[in-house]
Image (tube, rainbow, N blue to C red):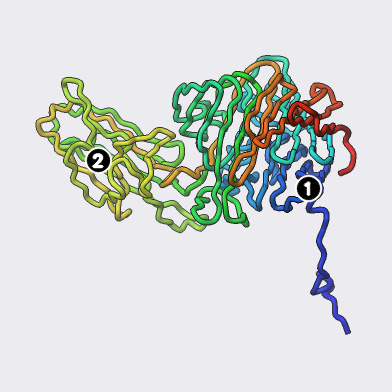
């Protein structure tokens, strides 16, 4: 007698290979469209899979992510998911950062998050050389006039192409964002380094405040930002949330073909590495407390002091490292991560002397990897600024103060300037996840972005836009592909791919309609 489980049915299922793993698909009820390249004689794991979001609720418990490039997978490896940076549900960063539009792969307006509004699919096409989908959402933010936002995504044999269109009634700031690990650099027709800022913005109402250590560039012409995420041997998945990736590399070049002029920003995504440390500090001159304070040190916290020490013979920097508490009020020891990022004296002739240059006496201070190195041997950064002369300050025994003592004899010191905080990104930083932004301004924003995910060698030779609707991609094997989006301003969206070799058309395909996959 054959027994069947009343819930799970047969204990052994017949061998079956589904053909759906090769096809494109969409689901209007949850608002995702998934496209897969259909290259002949290629293993399925080597095909490109890309997903675009358009649901009204938002993916993964209500994220504000309509038009988000939700996923790109190839070779069994994934570069992104909605919870790639995870702070947990109880933490305020879930609402302040994790769910919000600044953590997504989409165009963001004025650094604001989307509000829930109607969205719809305008195009879905399954072909041979080209797979395509287009989505639209309206009324991007209730704190501005209604803004229309559309994204058209095409997947070819070798790359993904995105056409973005946004329109408002007033001038706005637009940032085309990508969140990718392993930044390698930017190359462009013209590239000029502008500046470094500690944060993407200091606006306390913007999620961009949580993106530290930002480098800014002025770009003209086509640009390409390169990334490489490593899985398996050599991987560094600290601060990220991804599972079941096939060992190896997933490289990604992000080509911005349009706009022809932009400001580009690269900053660190606000990964959670567990650095939230209650601290108290004192600065004593000849035993007299000249400055003191206490705060919870984390990604965006620092304490500063600038005090008069005229006539003082000795300086003491005292730090106490407190615990954090569980929901049941049990104390938990915090990590080693505190530093005097800046610690210097100013002499009566205006000279500045870093304490790191003087003879220091440590009592109950974990000296870690020494001056200017964090407790895992990396740079010391506090709110996105690097401090090469930083003094490690975490106590060895957290039940006692850690004390650094320095003699001021013969220095004629008149002031002490100090800054204390936690290094929130410990150790090697090559595999940190970065927020990459391409910024432009206007009533209307247009972007053309070509994304090539590859394992070893890129197949793209060059990318160049003819205008805001057309991009030319030259491949290293001699083919040239021209992709054109049509009627993106209206609802009748189409995408056309024309491929040339030696000046002759070898294939042509047009994506249109909203038919079944």
> Which quadrant of the rendered structure holds the C terminus?
top right
How far apart marks 2 and 1 lie (CA) works out to 67 Å
Q: Residue furthest left?
A: 410
In the displayed structure, would residue 257 be above or below residue 515? above
Secondary structure at numbered mark 2 = strand
Res. 116 image quadrant: top right
Question: Which residue lies under the disc numbered 2?
Answer: 317
Asked if residue 139 is positioned above or below residue 64 in the image, the reply reads above
Depth check: 174 or 341 in front? Answer: 174
Q: How many marks?
A: 2
Q: Residue at x 40, y 55 (%)?
A: 333
Residue placed most toward the observer, 77 or 198: 77
Q: Can you give x and y, in whole percent of width and height, for residue 398 in the image? A: 32, 53
Q: Quadrant of residue 165?
A: top right
| Disc 2 + disc 1, Cβ < 8 Å | no
Q: Is residue 515 left or right of residue 158?
A: right
Instruction: Identify whether 72 is placed above or below 482.
Output: below
Identify the secondary structure beneath mark 1. Answer: loop
* Residue 90 makes an appearance in the image: no
Label 2 vs 1, first from the N-terminus:
1
Q: Residue at x 38, y 49 (%)?
A: 376
Task: Identify which residue, 207 or 80, lies in the foreground.
Answer: 80
Image position of 11 (left or right of 64):
right
Q: Which image quarter is the N terminus in? A: bottom right
Badge 1 density bin: few <14, some 14–19, many ≥20, Cα 10 Å: few
Residue 193 seen in this snapshot:
yes
**Residue 10 picture location, percent across and down:** 83, 73
Mark 2 or 1, closer to the camera: 1
The residue lying at 53 percent from left, 26 percent from top is 203
Kindly identify which residue carries mark 1: 40
């Amino acid at each position: 007698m054959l027994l069947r489980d009343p819930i799970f049915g047969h204990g052994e299922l017949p061998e079956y290979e589904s053909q759906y793993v090769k096809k494109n698909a969409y689901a209007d009820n949850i608002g995702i469209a998934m496209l897969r390249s259909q290259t002949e004689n290629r293993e399925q794991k080597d095909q490109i899979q890309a997903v675009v979001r358009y649901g009204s609720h938002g993916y993964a418990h209500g994220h504000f992510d309509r038009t988000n490039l939700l996923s790109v997978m190839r070779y069994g490896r994934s570069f992104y998911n909605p919870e790639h940076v995870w702070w947990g549900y109880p933490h305020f960063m879930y609402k302040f950062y994790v769910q919000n539009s600044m953590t997504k792969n989409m165009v963001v307006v004025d650094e604001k998050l989307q509000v829930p509004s109607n969205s719809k699919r305008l195009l879905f096409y399954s072909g041979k050389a080209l797979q395509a989908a287009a989505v639209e959402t309206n009324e991007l933010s209730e704190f501005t006039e209604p803004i229309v936002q559309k994204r058209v995504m095409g997947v070819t044999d070798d790359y993904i192409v995105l056409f973005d269109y946004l329109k408002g009634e007033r001038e706005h700031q637009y940032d085309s964002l990508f969140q990718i690990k392993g930044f390698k650099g930017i190359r462009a027709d013209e590239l000029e380094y502008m500046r470094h800022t500690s944060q993407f913005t200091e606006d306390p109402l913007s999620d961009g405040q949580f993106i530290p250590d930002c480098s800014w560039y002025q770009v003209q012409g086509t640009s390409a930002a390169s990334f490489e995420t490593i899985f398996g041997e050599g991987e560094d998945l600290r601060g990220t949330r991804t599972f079941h990736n096939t060992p190896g590399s997933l490289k990604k070049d992000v080509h911005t073909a349009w706009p022809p002029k932009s400001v580009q920003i690269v900053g660190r995504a606000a990964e959670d590495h567990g650095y939230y440390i209650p601290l108290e500090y004192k600065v004593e001159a000849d035993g007299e407390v000249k400055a003191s304070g206490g705060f919870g040190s984390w990604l965006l916290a620092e304490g500063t002091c600038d005090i008069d020490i005229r006539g003082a013979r000795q300086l003491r920097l005292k730090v106490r490292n407190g615990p954090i508490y569980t929901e049941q009020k049990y104390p938990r020891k915090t990590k080693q991560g505190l530093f005097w990022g800046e610690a210097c004296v100013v002499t009566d002739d205006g000279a500045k002397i870093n304490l790191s240059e003087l003879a220091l006496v440590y009592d109950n201070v974990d000296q870690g990897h020494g001056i200017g190195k964090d407790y895992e041997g990396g740079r010391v950064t506090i709110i996105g600024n690097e401090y090469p002369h930083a003094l490690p300050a975490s106590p060895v025994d957290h039940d006692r103060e850690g004390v650094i003592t320095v003699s001021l004899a013969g220095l004629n010191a008149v002031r002490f300037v100090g800054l204390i905080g936690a290094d929130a990104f410990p150790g090697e930083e090559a595999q940190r996840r970065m927020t990459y932004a391409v910024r432009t301004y206007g009533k209307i924003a247009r972007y053309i972005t070509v994304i090539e995910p590859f394992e070893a060698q890129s197949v793209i030779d060059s990318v160049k836009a003819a205008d805001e609707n057309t991009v030319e991609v030259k491949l290293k094997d001699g083919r040239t592909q021209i992709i054109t989006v049509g009627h993106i301003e209206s609802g009748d969206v189409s995408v056309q791919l024309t491929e040339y070799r030696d000046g002759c058309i070898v294939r042509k395909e047009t994506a249109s309609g909203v038919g079944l996959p």
